[in-house]
């Protein structure tokens, strides 16, 4: 890797400062156009909790590794 290192991605769970390894892409159809994606970041510990939160509301669209995100998550 050359040039500036990307800042670590921090888990979106409240109070968690752990580096995220998962990105949960979601969409609230009442607020967002269908193609819009919001991103929550999750560490290994919080993935399940955040996934369940979004899943029960029907918001979750996909879960990807933060390695696959590129700059889109910033
Ligand atoms: Zn976390």
Image: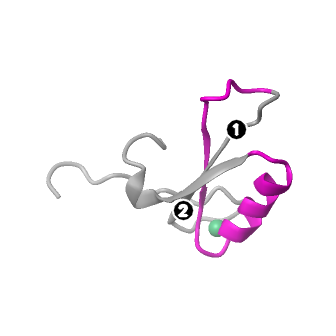
Horizontal placement of 34 versus 53: left or right?
left
In percent of width and height, residue 20 lies at 53, 63
As drawn, 3 above or below 52: above
Residue occupying the point 38% across, 42% down: 71
Badge number at residue 27: 1
Q: Is residue 46 magenta?
A: yes
| Residue 5 point in image, percent of width and height | 27, 54
Q: Quadrant of residue 38?
A: top right
Residue 22 is tagged as 2
Mark 1 and mark 2 residues within 8 Å of each other at the beta carbon:
no
**What's the image's color scheme?**
one colour
Which residue appears at 66% of the width and 67% of the height?
Answer: 47
Crowding at label 2, few (<14), some or many (≥20) Cα neighbours within 10 Å?
Answer: many
| Mark 1 vs mark 2, CA separation in Å | 16 Å
Q: Residue 46 shows which numbered tag? A: none
Q: Is mark 1 within 8 Å of ligand 1?
A: no
Relative side of 21 to 25, left or right:
left
Quadrant in which ligand 1 is drawn: bottom right
Q: Nearer the viewer, mark 1 or mark 2?
A: 1
Position in image of residue 13 (x %, y %): 70, 60
Return the disc, 1 or 2, that comes first in the chain's sequence.
Answer: 2
| Residue extending furthest toward the right | 56
The region drawn magenta spans: 31-59
In percent of width and height, residue 2 lies at 14, 53
Residue 43 figure quarter: bottom right
Q: Quadrant of the N terminus?
A: bottom left
- Please tell me in which quadrant of the rendered image residue 51 appears: bottom right
């Amino acid at each position: 890797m050359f040039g500036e290192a990307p800042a670590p991605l921090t888990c979106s769970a409240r109070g968690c400062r752990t580096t995220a390894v998962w990105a949960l892409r979601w969409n609230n159809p009442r607020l967002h156009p269908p193609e819009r994606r919001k991103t929550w970041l999750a560490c290994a510990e919080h993935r399940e909790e955040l996934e369940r939160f979004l899943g029960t509301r029907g918001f979750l669209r996909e879960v990807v590794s933060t390695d696959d995100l590129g700059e889109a998550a910033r």
